Each structure stands twice: as structure tokens, then as C-alpha cells.
Image: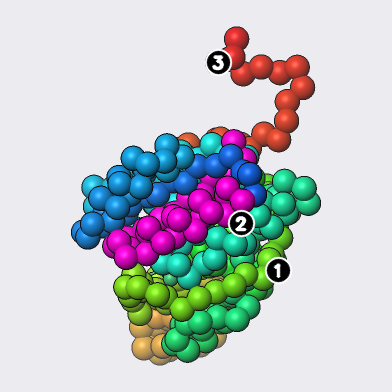
Amino acid sequence: MDLSVVIPLYNEEESLKELNDWIVRVMQSNHFSYEIVYVDDGSGDSSWKVIEDMSAGNPAIKGIRFRRNYGKSAALDEGFKAAKGDVVITMDADLQDSPEEIPELYRMISEDGYDIVSGWKKKRHDPITKTIPSKFYNWTTRRLSGIKLHDFNCGLKAYKLEVVKSIEVYGEMHRYIPVIARWAGYRNVGEKVVQHQKRKYGVTKFGIDRFIKGYLDLLSITFVSKFGQRPMHLFGTFGSLTFFAGFVIAAYLTYTKFFGHDYTRMTDRPLFYFGLLAMILGTQLFMTGFIADLISRNSTTNKTYQIKSKLNVKSEKED
Ligand code: UDP
Ligand code: MG
């Protein structure tokens, strides 16, 4: 199969039919073999009914329905598990992304050899309250990740099949999929300017809290990518430095007490409390590092390495 189109959706009943017809039209005129995987993220409207009706008339239309709303990342992750096409396209269900981009995205993955091609909504049709923070996030993510993309959170993206099979999109990490893919060793990331429309029906499914969550996820993604394997390297460094500063202060105070003919009580000197605090904080940071290290050692995700190819080596299962 050439293409899997994965579409996460939450209460998008008005757009589904129109979107589906459009995608099918594009697929047929380009003679692609395809599937469309709708992931209904716990919609409360008639979205699932629409999907059922559409799939009755076309076996290429598939659906997964969550029991409740888990979020866009979970929906994408589940869609990725189901996808079978050589190239996997993700797009939003609200008709903001255009299916006309699919053939070129497909070509960039299958012929130009990109692992991921990310859409870039160069001319955006969104309110200014969204476009300005978005610029800031994209700039920060570019700086932190070293990936030169203008628009990390574009819903329209294309992937090689093996990429989506080896990444895990959890929490609200769909905003940073190119970063996650890079950890997994997929570095060939391309970008394509895509058409963007105003939302035609319904309203956006993300509120103001998207900025707070986006910011926290950014911190988390930076931390995990730098120190996920060895948290002790971060906590241990800060812990040791802080403890050392506290120790020097305490040593200095002790010295002046005994040899400096300084008869003020130690507890009357503000520096004493600072030194005490630094030693306690340092120890705690150090302990946090130990615990984080233990947890990371026991977690399974660290043990599944992405193997690029094998030569005359079979895993136990294949034997
Ligand atoms: N979406 C989803 N689960 C959610 C929120 C959104 O599957 O909890 C889907 C939504 O239906 C749409 C896509 O994710 O297909 C992008 O959402 P939206 O258009 O509301 O985001 P925006 O364009 O405002 O960033
Ligand atoms: Mg949208």
C-alpha cells in the first residue's frame, strides 16, 4: 500500500464527509493505493456515525474510536500503530489542511528520501493570539533541538512507515514529533510550504492552556533529550556544586569561630543559614539524581534501541 492517511478528530462531524471526499478524489486521480484511518478521540457528536457510514461504502476507510477524549497525541499514536502504507500522512480533520498536498509529500518521502516532511503554514489563517506565541515556540524549539523547521506543530506531515512505528507520541507531545523522531535517529527532516485555510466548521479544540502545556512539554522534551538517559549528570552536577558552596561557607564560619577571634554566635550570622540551606539543597538534588537514575535504569523504553539494519543476526523470536 502506498499511503496511510491518519486523521485524529474530536467533534468534527461537519467536516468529515467533505474532507473524506476530497482525500479520496486526490487518491484516485493519482492512482495511489491507500487507506484512511480516522481516530475518533472520544467525540460526543455524530462523528463516529459519519465514519461508519463512509467506511460502509469504501473498505479503504478505517476507524478507531476511543472511549473518552485522550488528546491528539494519543489519537496519533494509535493511528500510527494501525498504519500500513509505505508513507504515512497525518492531517487535521477540520479542513484547515489541504489534501492536495498529499502527492507532493508522498514524492518527497518516497523519492527524495526524507524520513519526515513537515508542513509549513507560511501564510496562516489563524487569529493573532495563536500566531504570535507560535512564532516564539517555533523559535525556541529550533534553538533547543537544532532542527531547522519553521512550523513544528503543523498537523500536516508525512512520514516513512518505519518512523511512525518506532516513535511514541504521548502526553501532548504531538507538538514536538520531529524532535521525538530525531531521538529515535531519524535526522532527515524536510519541510514543505503548505496551503492553510480558515477553520470552516466548529471551533478549535485547544484553549489558552495550550501555551502553558506547550511550554512545559518543551522543558520536558529538552530535559529528557539531554538527560533522560543519565539524569544524574544534571542533578549530580548541580547537587555537588551547591553542596560544595555550602561546605565552603560552613568551613569558613568554623574557621573564623575558632581562629578568627570572632565571638558572634554562628547562628547570628546570615551566612550560616545560607551555608546550611546550600548543603541541604545540594544533598537533596544529589538524592533526586540517584532516584531518577534508578528509575531510568528500570524503565523499558531505554532498552529498546532502534536498530537500523542487521547482518546475519537473528533475534531469538525469529529462530
Ligand atoms: N483533536 C483531537 N483530540 C483533541 C483535540 C483535537 O483529535 O483532544 C483533533 C481535532 O479534531 C483536529 C486536530 O486535532 O482534527 C487539530 O485540532 P484543532 O483544529 O482544534 O487545533 P488548531 O488548528 O486550533 O491548532
Ligand atoms: Mg485546526
Q: Nearer the viewer, mark 3 or mark 2?
A: 2
Name the kind of residue labelled 2 in the image.
Answer: Ile
Circle 2 — which element? helix
Q: Nearer the viewer, mark 1 or mark 2?
A: 2
Report the span colored magenta: 1-29
Mark 2 and mark 1 in contact (Cβ < 8 Å)?
no
Circle 3 — which element? helix
Residue 216: x and y in percent read 44, 69
The residue tagged 1 is: 148
In the rendered view, does 166 fall on the left or right side of 182? Answer: left
Whether 82 is drawn above or below 158: the answer is above
Residue 187: x and y in percent read 71, 53
Distance of label 1 from label 2 (alpha carbons): 22 Å
| Residue nearer the viewer, 240 or 36 | 36
| Residue nearer the viewer, 280 or 1 | 1
The residue tagged 2 is: 102
Q: Residues within 10 Å of mark 3 (few under 14, many from 20)?
A: few
Residue 296 seen in the current view: no
Q: What residue lies at 42% left-to-right and 75% top-to-bottom?
A: 199
Sequence-earlier tag: 1 or 2: 2
Q: Residues within 10 Å of mark 2 (few under 14, many from 20)?
A: many
Name the kind of residue labelled 3 in the image.
Answer: Lys
Q: Residues within 10 Å of mark 1 (few under 14, many from 20)?
A: some
Split into quadrants, the picture shows ligand 2 in the one at: bottom left
Residue 122: x and y in percent read 63, 78
| Residue nearer the viewer, 261 or 297 | 297
Queried on whether the Cβ of the residue with tag 2 lies below 8 angstroms from ligand 1, the answer reads no
The residue tagged 3 is: 317
| Residue nearer the viewer, 85 or 56 | 56
Name the kind of residue labelled 1 in the image.
Answer: Lys
